[in-house]
């Protein structure tokens, strides 16, 4: 078989600029992330997830009445069609929540008669439904698989509050809800990451938004993308104690194993999202009176900086933050989708608005000029 030696193709499309976008930008050298011109720190400090969604979709911050209108649209669309919930009840209880999310979101298409429309108005209507319902599906699945009644969404709550409410059956405390809201802000967009690029490829064929988002969920599920946050927590649990960290990290590095939540393909300095999540991991630890996971994480961070010059990424401290919020480990990646749906749909709307089919070339390395041999003669 031919091998890809001296390829002119960029492995993993690294460094290839594949689209123009006004939605977000990552400056990996300086550790700066912006959404539509606004620094992520400014948004995390002052904004809400819903306001950020408006920003990503419209290119500017909303006036109060515009935000009120969007909030009203989200809230009137929190409930997913009952047929989708009924379908989820037939799934095996051990189904992976990302597989459930992918399948349920795909089926939402059946219940939106205008779900294949690619004009701005109707595609935005579908984007509103998808953004409103992602958390409803993720929380409902956790209830269903545990044999509990599904908690209906509460239209008086924000997307962040509602997710925690539907998951637990009780309203979250205000400080926790605010932290979770900022977590959604931090994960909302990250330029042409693998899942967002996937959504652009699918919508670039003028396929409907539900199909494009379904494909994005499939891409996000992989351990090299959204799946890393769950693996960080599994790693912390496996290490087990602060005393065991040094030996565990030494062993892992000697065996050339990667430390989950460390390193980034673009950031060469502190990931600005990690700054917030480190703070939240500490706050949640203090609130719960359990500093173990935070202290272990800090020690791993210090060792990896000293030994490899590598920094934590967005997944590193989100793991212990969610853990201390009593969120099941395998819901961390669905939570990523609850947030990233805003960036995906922003990119899909941008793609529809100025569409060109995405169709790169492959560098052919196979054989040529072979003569067909009848099967009996091979
Ligand atoms: N722990 C230990 N070593 C790591 C590492 C980690 N988390 N991440 C990278 N390295 C090492 C690699 O082993 C490699 O070493 P080598 O040159 O001796 O072979 C070198 O650093 C380059 O790694 P590479 O995977 O090619 O770099 P990248 O910039 O393409 O990788 C990631 C970026 C995110 C894929 C990578 O850092 C990683 O796998 N991190 C862990 C998973 C994770 O947290 N993913 C979520 C990303 S938001």
Image (cartoon, rainbow, N blue to C red):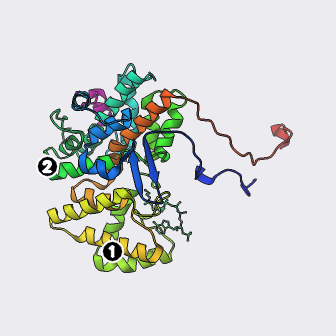
Give the percent coordinates (x, y) of residue 231. Answer: 38, 60
How dense is the environment of label 1, judged by Cα within 10 Å: few (below 14), some, or many (20 and up)?
Answer: some
Which disc, if any, is residue 299? Answer: 1
**SS category of the residue bearing label 1:** helix
In the image, 310 versus 330, the foreground residue is 310
Q: Work out which residue is located at the far top of the displayed protein and give it.
A: 113
Asked if disc 1 is less than 8 Å from ligand 1, the answer is no
Which residue lies under the disc numbered 2?
174
The structure residue drawn at horizontal position 42% and vertical position 73%, both measured from the top left corner, is 304
Give the percent coordinates (x, y) of residue 153. Answer: 19, 35
Q: Quadrant of residue 346?
A: top left
26 sits to left or right of 372? left
On whether residue 82 falls in the magenta region, the answer is yes
Q: What is the CA distance from the residue labelled 1 to the residue labelled 2?
A: 30 Å
Q: Quadrant of residue 102?
A: top left
Q: Is residue 90 visible?
A: no
How dense is the environment of label 2, judged by Cα within 10 Å: few (below 14), some, or many (20 and up)?
Answer: few
In the image, 327 versus 93, the foreground residue is 327
The structure residue drawn at horizontal position 48% and vertical position 27%, both measured from the top left corner, is 353
Q: Tell me if residue 279 comes above or below residue 348 in the rendering.
A: below
> Which region of the structure is painted magenta?
76-89
Q: How many marks can you see?
A: 2
On whether residue 211 falls in the magenta region, the answer is no
Q: Quadrant of residue 297?
A: bottom left
Q: Is mark 1 in CB contact (under 8 Å) with mark 2?
A: no
Q: Is residue 80 visible?
A: yes
The structure residue drawn at horizontal position 42% and vertical position 65%, both measured from the top left corner, is 262
Quarter holding the C terminus? top right
Asked if disc 2 is less than 8 Å from ligand 1, the answer is no
Give the percent coordinates (x, y) of residue 366. Answer: 76, 47
Whichever of labels 1 and 2 marks the residue nearer the N terminus, that label is 2
Give the percent coordinates (x, y) of residue 237. Answer: 31, 67
């Amino acid at each position: 078989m031919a091998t890809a030696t001296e390829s002119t193709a960029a492995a993993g499309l690294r460094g290839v600029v594949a689209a123009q976008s006004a939605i977000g930008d990552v400056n990996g050298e300086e550790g700066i992330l912006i959404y539509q011109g606004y620094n992520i720190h400014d948004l995390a400090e002052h904004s809400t997830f819903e306001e950020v969604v408006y920003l990503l979709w419209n290119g500017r911050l909303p006036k109060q009445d515009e935000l009120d209108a969007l909030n009203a649209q989200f809230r009137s669309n929190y409930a997913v069609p009952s047929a989708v919930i009924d379908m989820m009840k037939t799934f095996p209880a051990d189904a992976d929540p990302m597989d459930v999310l992918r399948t349920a979101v795909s089926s939402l298409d059946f219940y939106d008669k205008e779900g294949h429309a690619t004009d701005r108005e109707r595609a935005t209507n579908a984007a509103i439904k998808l953004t409103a319902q992602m958390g409803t599906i993720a929380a409902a699945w956790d209830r269903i698989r545990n044999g509990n009644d599904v908690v209906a969404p509460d239209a008086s709550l924000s997307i962040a509050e509602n997710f925690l409410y539907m998951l637990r059956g009780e309203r979250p405390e205000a400080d926790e809800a605010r932290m979770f809201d900022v977590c959604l802000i931090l994960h909302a967009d990250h330029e042409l990451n693998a899942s967002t690029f996937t959504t652009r490829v699918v919508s670039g064929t003028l396929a409907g938004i539900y199909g494009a988002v379904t494909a994005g969920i499939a891409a996000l599920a992989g351990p090299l993308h959204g799946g890393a946050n769950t693996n960080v927590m599994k790693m912390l649990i496996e290490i087990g104690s602060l005393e065991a960290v040094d030996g565990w990290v030494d062993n892992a590095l000697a065996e050339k194993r990667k430390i989950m939540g460390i390193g980034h393909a673009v950031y060469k300095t502190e990931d600005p999202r990690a700054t917030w999540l480190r703070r939240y991991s500490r706050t949640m630890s203090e609130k719960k009176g359990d500093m173990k996971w935070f202290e272990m994480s800090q020690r791993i961070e210090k060792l990896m900086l000293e030994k490899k010059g590598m920094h934590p990424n967005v997944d590193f401290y989100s793991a212990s933050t969610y853990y201390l919020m009593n969120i099941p480990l395998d819901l961390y990646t669905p939570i990523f989708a609850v947030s990233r749906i805003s960036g995906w749909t922003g990119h899909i709307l941008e793609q529809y608005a100025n569409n060109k089919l995405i169709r790169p070339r492959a560098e052919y390395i196979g054989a040529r000029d072979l003569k067909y041999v009848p099967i009996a003669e091979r």
